[in-house]
């Protein structure tokens, strides 16, 4: 069974780890890097999505940082051995490394705890990657976030030889034993950024180090005319709000207000995920066939033109009302 492509989305990643049995973490879209500083009290790391360029992976060393082949056993690192799963792999590399740094806040659940125990004796990162690709439980959860597609694609279009402009990739940044690491499943080993050190365990310093690393990676992406996005991984908001309330850091009123806002956001995520899973391509395709079958080519072309105009009119009315 293959792995299907899923979207880079904070709501999807949050629900994905929840469905895997994880508690204590969630994800957030980052539109401006300054937001990482605002999340410093709860920040665990960041996942960076960028356009893949084969040339960046052709050298003996990464463009930034250095490979650390002698990385600690407590740092989990698996290579990407399958297509369409780089987002889930980035999430797993991050989570399975973070749990040992934050055992009181992150709970893996039985699925990932058993997986981590099974792979704990593996030092070979490719073997760990193969273990992920062969996990029916992880693959089934991953695929549950891809919408059914009625169109069968040629396998050649899915090969690694397709143009790099069509391929995007994920890497993640976390702090481990006071040093910033980059976990990229296409690399032979974790990348350590030795100059980004946080000896005191200061949360604000960690957020600053992540910001610096991301700024550098964004500059590389911009230089190659690439696109990118950032998703933060942080402590579960509901857990954090409860801890603030228990500590007396926020009032009952503020707790209830912020809790309601968080629940509204999660409800919105749930609706969006449901719509993604209910792909309507098949219905639209069948309707189009029925409509087109009773028309001449000229009539069909005229209908398309009218539909395009009606759509543009609706868009203009919508923006005019904002």
Image (cartoon, helix red, strand yellow):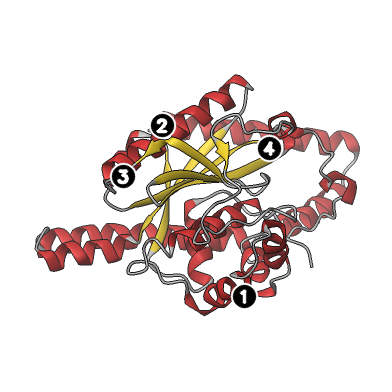
Element class at badge 3: loop
From the viewer's perspective, tell me whether residue 132 is left or right of residue 259: right
Q: How far apart are marks 4 and 3 (CA)?
A: 61 Å
Q: Nearer the viewer, mark 1 or mark 2?
A: 1
Say what secondary structure mark 1 lies in: helix
Is any part of residue 154 visible from this angle?
no
Locate residue 296, reporting x and y percent. Answer: 90, 40
Query: Mark 3 vs mark 2: which is more N-terminal?
Result: 3
Q: Mark 1 points at which residue?
A: 118
- In this picture, is 1 found above or below 158? below
Name the residue: 57% across, 78% down: 114
> Label 4 to label 2, Cα distance in Å?
48 Å
Q: Earlier in the sequence, mark 4 or mark 3?
A: 3
The residue identified by callout 2 is 212
Determine crowd level at label 1: few under 14, some 14-19, many 20+ residues with C-alpha closer than 10 A. Answer: few
Residue at horizontal 69 percent and vertical 71 percent from the top = 135
Separation (CA) of disc 1 from disc 4: 56 Å
Specify the label residue 190 is tagged with.
none
Q: Which is nearer the eye, 291 or 239? A: 239
Where the C terminus falls, by quadrant? top left
Q: Which of marks 1 and 4 is nearer the N terminus?
A: 1
Point 26% across, 46% down: residue: 202
Residue placed under numbered mark 3 in the picture: 199
- Label 4–label 3 contact, CB within 8 A: no
Residue at the extreme top: 223
Disc 1 to disc 3, C-alpha distance: 32 Å
- Mark 4 / mark 2, whichever is N-terminal: 2
The residue wearing badge 4 is: 307
Mark 3, residues whose alpha carbon is within 10 Å: few (<14), some, or many (≥20)? few
Does 54 sit left or right of 254 as displayed?
right
Q: Position of residue 271 (x, y in %)?
A: 48, 61
**In the image, residue 2 lies at what x, y percent?**
78, 63
């Amino acid at each position: 069974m293959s792995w299907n492509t899923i979207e880079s989305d904070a709501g999807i990643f949050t629900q994905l780890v929840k469905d895997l049995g994880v508690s204590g973490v969630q994800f957030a879209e980052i539109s401006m890097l300054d937001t990482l500083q605002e999340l410093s009290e709860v920040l665990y790391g960041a996942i960076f999505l960028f356009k893949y360029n084969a040339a960046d992976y052709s050298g003996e060393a990464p463009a930034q940082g250095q490979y650390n082949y002698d990385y600690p056993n407590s740092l989990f690192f698996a290579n990407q051995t399958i297509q369409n799963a780089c987002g889930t792999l980035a999430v797993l590399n991050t989570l399975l490394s973070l749990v040992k740094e934050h055992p009181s806040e992150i709970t893996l659940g039985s699925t990932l705890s058993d997986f981590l125990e099974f792979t704990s004796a593996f030092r070979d990162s490719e073997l760990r990657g193969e273990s992920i690709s062969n996990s029916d439980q992880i693959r089934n959860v991953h695929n549950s976030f891809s919408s059914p597609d009625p169109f069968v694609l040629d396998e050649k279009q899915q090969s690694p030889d397709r143009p790099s402009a069509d391929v995007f990739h994920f890497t993640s940044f976390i702090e481990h034993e006071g040093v910033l690491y980059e976990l990229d499943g296409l690399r032979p080993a974790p990348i350590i950024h030795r100059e980004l050190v946080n000896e005191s365990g200061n949360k604000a310093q960690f957020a600053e180090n992540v910001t610096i690393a991301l700024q550098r990676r964004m500059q590389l992406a911009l230089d190659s005319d690439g696109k990118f996005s950032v998703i933060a991984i942080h402590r579960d908001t509901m857990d954090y709000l409860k801890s603030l309330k228990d500590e007396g850091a926020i009032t009952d009123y503020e707790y209830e207000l912020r809790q309601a806002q968080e629940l509204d956001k999660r409800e919105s995520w749930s609706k969006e995920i449901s719509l993604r899973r209910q792909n309507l391509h098949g219905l639209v395709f069948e309707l189009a066939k029925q409509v087109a079958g009773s028309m001449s080519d000229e009539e069909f072309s005229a209908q398309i033109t009218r539909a395009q105009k009606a759509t543009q009119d609706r868009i203009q009315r919508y923006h005019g009302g904002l």
